[in-house]
Amino acid sequence: MTPFLKWPGGKRWFVANHIELLPKRFNRYIEPFLGSGSVFFYLKPKRAILGDSNPDLVAAYQGIKDDWVGVEQLLEKHGEEHGEAYYYMVRGTEPRKHTNRAARLIYLNRTCFNGIHRVNLDGKFNVPRGTKDSVIFDTDDFEEVSYLLANAELRVSDFEALIDEAKRNDLVFADPPYTVRHNINGFIKYNETLFSWKDQIRLADALARARDRGAKIVSTNANNVLVQKLYEVRGFNTKTVSRFSSISANPKSRKRFEELVILAGLKEERRS
């Protein structure tokens, strides 16, 4: 299933090229950095806890879960009205109902510049209009998304609280915010505004505790020597994989980057 959102750092490339790193069997699926949910939509787990610190993102999933028909109807309206003035009008709104919040976020995600999600210091979405005008996609299947979300708990939460709920044979997929553009030089400085080094340590410790309780761990991160050591000293296995980066205003500057995959508890469970 194609995710309904394009999200910076999304893992469509991971699902397309590295599914052998995901386990065949697990109990609950726990994803504390939800984003576009690529791995969730691929695995289609029977039980899940999905969370993120972004309330608008979680509200989008909740809106589709509760009223996918209403979300689709609102998106059709957005598509009919879409234009320069209309985009900025919708961008300036703050709807309260999950259905309206879901349609707003999806509309802005599909028509803003490069699918970027960025807010200002006041928490207001401030990405300018992009060049794409399509609001409804051929790949949209909000009914199926709603069906998959029926048995998922959706939470606005810090990642640590969600990971601490992982029990034996649960699968934790953790994809924290980070950039791979400065894998060596300036890694800490460049990434600190996305996900601080203290948060990196807190995440590694939370994943280690979950592993020690018997949970299966798959986590992605920047392929940086400091991150490698952070996990290797805690007894995790690490693997380097490559991905293509499309987040650049200049197509000529888009290229392949290496990322790190952190693994635990999967030796006998990986896909062939």
Image: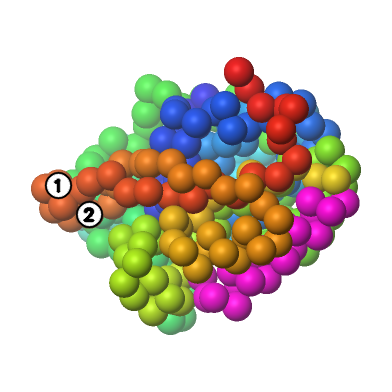
Residue 132 spot, x, y in % from top left: 23, 42
Q: Amino acid at mark 2?
A: Ser
**Residue located at (28% from left, 52% from top):** 247
Magenta stretch: includes residue 93: no
Name the foreground residue: 229 vs 254: 229
Q: Is residue 68 above or below residue 203?
A: above
**Residue located at (35% from left, 67% from top):** 184
Location of mark 1 (residue): 251
Magenta stretch: includes residue 209: yes
Residue 36 spot, x, y in % from top left: 51, 44
How far apart marks 2 and 1 lie (CA) works out to 7 Å
CA neighbours of label 2 inside 10 A, class few (<14), some (14 to 19), many (20+)? few
**Residue located at (44% from left, 28% from top):** 16
Quarter assignment of residue 127:
bottom left
Residue 93 visible in rendering: no
Q: Is residue 129 above or below residue 23?
A: below
CA neighbours of label 1 inside 10 A, class few (<14), some (14 to 19), many (20+)? few
Residue 101 spot, x, y in % from top left: 54, 53
Per the image, label 2 sits on a secondary structure element best described as loop
**Residue located at (67% from left, 52% from top):** 236
Q: Which residues are magenta?
A: 195-213
Q: Relative to residue 228, is residue 160 drawn left or right?
A: right
Whether pointer 2 and pointer 1 mark residues with C-beta atoms closer than 8 Å, the reply is: yes
Residue 220 visible in rendering: yes
- Numbered circle sitting on residue 248: 2
- Numbered circle sitting on residue 121: none
